[in-house]
Image (tube, coloured by chain):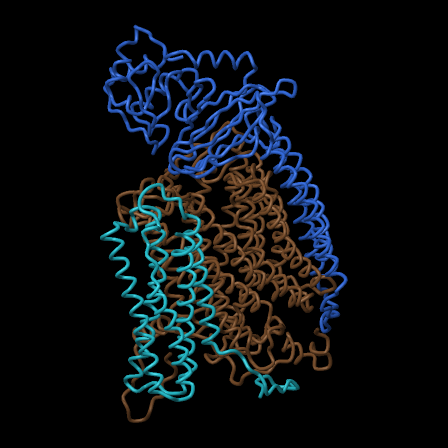
Chain colours: A cyan, B brown, C blue
Amino acid sequence: MSAIPGTVPIFANENWQLPSRGRVGMFALIIGESAIFTIFVVAYIYYIGRSTYGPGPQILEIPIFNSICLISSSLTIVLAEHAIKHGRLRAFAAWWALTMLLGLEFLAGTAMEWRRLIFEDHLTIRTNLFGTTFYSLVGLHATHVIVGMTGLSLVMLFTVLGRVEQRHAARIQVLALYWHFVDAVWVVVFTVVYIVGR
Amino acid sequence: MADQTYPMPGTLDATPSRGAALLEWIHSWVVTVDHKKLGILYAVYAIFFLVVAGAEAMAIRIQLAVPHNHFLSPELYNEFFTMHGTTMVFLVGMTFIFGFGNYLVPLMIGARDMAFPRLNAFSFWMSAFGGLFLYFSFIGGFGLYGMGSAPDVSWWAYAPLTARAFSPGHNTDYWALALIVMGFGTLGAGINTLATAFSMRCRGMTLFRMPLFVWLMVVTSGLTLIVITPLTAAQIMLIIDRYLGGHFFDTQAGGSATVWMHFFWIFGHPEVYVLILPAFGIASEVIPVFSRKAIFGYPAMVAASVGIAFVSLSVWAHHMFTIGMTSVSNAFFALSTMMVGIPTGIKIFNWVATMWGGKIRFATPMLFCTAFVFQFLCAGLTGIMLAVAPWNWQLHNSYFVIAHFHYTLTGSFVFCFFAGIYYWYPKVTGRMLSEKLGKWHFWLFFIGFHVTFDTMHFLGILGMPRSIYTYEPDRGWNTLNAIVSAGGFVQGIAVLLLAWNLIDSYFNGRAAGNDPWDAWTLEWSTPSPPPDYNFAEEPVVRSRRPLWDIKHPNDPDWKYER
Amino acid sequence: MRTGRCFASIRWRLCLLFLLCLGLASAGAQQSSNVPSILDPSSTPAREILGLSQFVLLITGAIFVVVGGLLAFILIKFHERDTDRGHEPAQIYGSVQVELAWTVIPVLIVVVLFLTTARIIFAIQDAPKPATALDVTVIGHQFWWEFRYPGLGIVTANELHLPVSSAAAPRPAYMQLLSADVDHSFWVPQLGGKTDLIPNHPNAMWTDPEKPGLYLGQCAQFCGLEHAKMLLRVYVDTPEQFDAWVKNQQQPGAQNHAVEAGRRVFETQACVNCHIIAGTAGHGTFGPDLTHLMSRGTIAAGAADNTPDNLRAWIQDPNTFKPGALMPAMQLSDEQTNEVVAYLTTLH
């Protein structure tokens, strides 16, 4: 069909497929967020060892359990996506809830780590350069986890209310992309802070 | 939006009163998610702040017209030059770009709206709020009793001048917070443009059949995503330093002033390409139509645009040649900066080749675009001069640099956007702008521009640094400064002419019709102004110039395009 | 008719530009010796930069003439004539040969430009330091310059003295650049390019002044309220003049009993918290060292000439010359001010 009179639509393209705008939009957001994380990571790396006083990264304990939880949540969310794609809504709800639980554990674990650092090791964002870079980078990531959890909670709410159906699978996948991004960033942050930086 | 009311026999007259109609009209603009209305909102906002920042520039030039002048105090001068730069880049530049992009991209690709209309509205209002917050700083804090708390740390806000110790007031905070808020708006607009261009093209419009303006908005949006967030990151770090006791830029605690410079210019340099690429897009639409020829070398233009975006990410430290980097670093950045001149030069050659052999019509849009090509050539050449690091050690932070970037920003960006205003105003409003006023606007602005900015190059060569509220009378700069200031007034008058033209032609302009310029891209196939839904039926295209194919059925583009 | 008007307007435009250039050339030609022009080099780095810049100008000028000339030609030859209505010109979509040519040629130009640039970068930045070099430490403060000569035991402010240097008797000045607060930049165009002073980021630069004289410059990195008044005066002295100046600076502060009252004002008021005068109780380093104040031609980093009246006005309220200078108004009585000015004017 053509709106312009006189056009001869010789280009009869039955295969006119364009990428979904949700996916393009989410990829674009991920690119932007990657840039902001890159800057904080570069600052962290550049400032390793440059604090002129105060506690250094040797006081950090590697958060292995937290990380396993967060990375596993990527796996459970993939299983949830798979479930809803095939219309198995109860399985979807279960995997989704498990994902949220794992994410919550990560946040709780981070909170406990920070509590120990602040009250026992006396490291705050203002203590020294290490404190500043550590709390900003890990905090920025944690903020993004919270944002992701908010999105996950909304979906959980709609699922419990029975409003989520198989036809919403594509949208669920777009949100899951964000969650995967948050996990991928944790891999980078974990490596830089707890392995390279120590 | 309220349409017609149909009075029915036997009922009360329910025609709304004039007050209610006005309220309804305002309300429709506030809640709109229509890309055309948001585009107009962005553009009106940009033009308003162009006048405001222009007034700031005039105050600066009055202060500098004679040495040891007392028109502006040092505090006020520092606020004015900071605000002039910040306003022009963010409140005029970014808003013009996304205003034009918002309005034109869906129309040019045969879509009904942007991919995410509500995100679109959110982006505009975030940008608008950020800008108003920035200007509130003049009256916020102790503003009503003194000089105000407007940012006064220059638009690049180097650390540690921005630390609490050296900037105890709220000036820096207004700068950082307003720009963070505007950054969210910009991010949203960038995401939206990419999603629209990739996901909402009409049938037959492959990526290589998109109008060049759309291509350049795509490249710009992609660059924006990578580039605005570093600024946001640096500003968050600054706020952490100022309010949470952080030490990012605290040189006593191991932090570094040069880290701020790197982060800022990693944003700042590609930012100027973000600004200029859509201007290139406008030129790539206007020049072919007014030369009556297809753009020369479309694939090369696309490749050059993408090339510019990539190379521009590698040049940032050419703003930092004097900070004491190693000779190897200086050499690297000199090379990368020279290299960005290659794709940029290719674009200039392509425009010139488009005009070659054409039948050039010098209507106002084409006057502005022709001057742009000449001025961008000059700007590129002074850019090459600045890329030569040893020469940069002399010219950095002097009036030569100011002249160079005003050649790119005023002489290229503003000239192209003026061309775009004259070109698309008929589509947006259904009326033609006055051609006579347009020519007066052009010649006055052109003359004023050259009087000011040609002269400014010499001031830099004679050793006058930038960011100074006054200068010594025994250094040989007096006459040149007076000339520079005089040119500014001429430009101001020209812009006022434009403002008058915009308003007067809305009511009294000649009716435009669908296609007053005999152009070839899809937006000219709709009525002027287009209906809410843009296209009654989704267009199907077969080449880069769908309307050329219709107007020349025996010689359509798709026979020749590669 | 339309052709004529268009043509005339282009000619008129070109004439205007030509007249503009003439005017600017004559305006710029009013050079006095104090104009800090980069076209008037007086040291090796400044000279090498000028030479490079002339080469670059040649290349960019050639590009300007070719492309600008082409553009001018097109505007005259290809603009629409009345006879053109009704048919479009030949549509040319591109040309591989032409596009290749105008890609390859710029690449070659960039290669040439880069190689010449890199050579000068290394020549200036990595120049080996001769044994006869004079060491100077420059410390930038908000709105004034501190100069130390570590090898000579001299501390002074705002006015730099350097010995002239020649190929036969090289004595370049190697300056270490530090900052006490924010970023500054040392720029004296006739003596070379600028280098920034960044806190906790020591920088270095060198210059070998060729001719005795006074060279002007100023801070070239925005550093706050009075950035505009952070001026530089560099006195390049003949070897004899320089030795005399060094000898004088190395003397302890003048001890003149006639101005004992003024000296007491200096030591008992808050002056000593910020200023040093060798031989007194003053130990402050926030402000310039005043031991040899009268050997300088200006005060307040060039904001005013060094006269007793200006000194008096400055001490009473620095905002007279430099609103926002970090020195507070000292709230001295008239008698105290006169006494301390009398004392300061003996500090040669």
> Residue pushed farthest right?
C97
- Number of numbered discs: 0
Residue C56 visible: yes
Residue B232 shows in this picture: no
> Percent position (x, y) of residue A98?
32, 77
**Residue B499, image x, y percentages:** 47, 59
Above or below residue B402? Residue A10 is below
Question: Is B363 placed above or below A102 here?
Answer: above
Q: Position of residue B264 (x, y in %)?
A: 45, 50
Residue extending farthest to the top is C257
Task: Name the residue located 49 percent from the left edge and 34 percent from the top edge.
Answer: C203
B45 or C57: which is nearer to us?
C57
Looking at this view, is B60 or C158 the one in front?
C158
In this orientation, which residue lies closer to the viewer: B555 or A194? A194
Relative to C57, residue B297 above or below? below
- Left or right: residue B318 versus residue B557 is left
Front in this rendered view, residue B204 or C282: C282
